[in-house]
Image: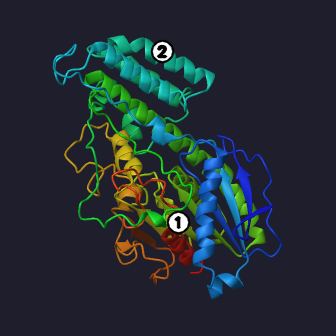
Amino acid sequence: MNNIAGIPYTEANFDQDGKLLNDPQLPEGTTDLIVISHGWLNDRAAAERLYTDLMTNFAKVTQGDRIIKQRKLALIGVLWPSKQLDLAMTQPTITKKQAGGAASVGTVEPAETQQAMNEAIERAATVFDEPSELEQLEKLRSLTPQLENDVEAQIEFIETLRKMLDPDGSLAGMQSSDDASDKFFEGNPADIFANANLAAPASTADSSLPEAPAAGDRAVGEESGQAASLASGLSGAANSVANLLNLTTYFKMKMRAGTVGSKGLAPLIDRLAAHVERIHLAGHSFGGRLVTAAATDSKTPKLHSLSLLQAAFSHNGFSRSRNGFFRKLVDARRVLGPVLITHSKFDRSVGLAYPAASRINGDKTQAFGGADDEFGGIGSNGAQHMDEGEIFDGAQTMLEVGGAYQLKGAKLHNLESSAFIVDPADSRRDAHGFVFVPQVAWAISRAVIF
């Protein structure tokens, strides 16, 4: 077993069906097990870098903590086959011809439109890489020349996407309203294709938010990734194709994260619970969905804290009134201690990509991706539409290292984190990956010692 900053560390490797591929063991006498899951990454090195940076900061900020010194911590890093969605969900931007060129200002050549569609399909192939899925992608390619004006081709495009996601029909009736997957599988295909022609705003950054911290606060070697830019310069069918491939990519990773959490991680923590006093779960991005699924479906009464770091699921995911997919976690009080939910307006991946992937019902009247958006992300807005008393003291703010948090067991804590989860070099860039910073580590440590 290795260690990170003196904390014993091992890995739990899962395949896409949630099968555990190794046998993680804990040191004798472990009191507190911390389990962390990465999100949309594409290799082991990126996951290990996140775990190393975050837990190194955890060790630094708790160096003099009396309670931490009395505990014997161990760390498990979850490894599961996710993909780099900040690339897979990025749509192409067509360069519009300038005056005097082959086309007038603001127009897009048919060949460029065709190229944009094909590029969107190619990016999806990084996620849909099974032989049967690649066959369906080839079918999508064959339909692209007819998509601009042929409704029958548009319907076949949607039906092919559905088959990619659910080839045997086993997901019928299992989709959720909190991310519009039910509308995608059950709605009129022609309407879905038309509604997917949605242009996203260039930025969700709020000018009233705090300025970015100094670049020196950033961990050495950390890579933040690029923003998931949404359709810009695309016209008609090309815009719909790009958004629809974003949508199906999101659904694919959503289903995989849920499967690994429920069928893989939940049984593992139930088994390991016999050897520890407390279990703490933390997850970034789709890893937030993974650990939430594990917490919801596990049986152990030793879940002591849950930290969702820019999690990629609906901000209604815990809501009773909105039939949130993870409502059971709240009703059954699956987590005895605090549930921390970081959210940042500088997170473009959750702040834009999530609601854009979900906005297929044609409702464009709400604030795009904001707290009033039916399909906003929890990593952008925190938990929304909760019953009275379920969110402790309403909205809270992430504190500097050393700050005194007011935490309460079995309550949700929305931590507005824009002051710290931000690219310190340029706040206009995506901050989705900046969850390793000392302030996040400090917040997690307060939940651990609760």
Residue 66, x across and y down, in percent: 64, 88
Instruction: Kindly report the distance in space between the C-alpha atoms of the residues bearing marks 1 and 2.
Output: 41 Å
Q: In which quarter of the image is residue 91?
A: top left
Q: Which amino acid does label 1 sit on?
A: Ser
Considering the image in quadrants, where does the N terminus appear?
A: bottom right
Helix, strand or loop for disc 1: strand
Up/down of 380 relative to 443, above or below: above
Q: Describe residue 412's horizontal placement relative to residue 232 as left or right.
A: right
The numbered dot on residue 139 is: 2
Residue 430, x across and y down, in percent: 40, 50
Q: Quadrant of residue 276?
A: bottom right
The numbered dot on residue 141 is: none
Q: What residue type is labelled 2?
A: Lys
Q: Quadrant of residue 209?
A: bottom left
Name the residue: 46% across, 82% down: 403
Residue 376, x across and y down, in percent: 34, 52
Residue 129, x across and y down, in percent: 59, 27
Label 1 vs 2, first from the N-terminus: 2
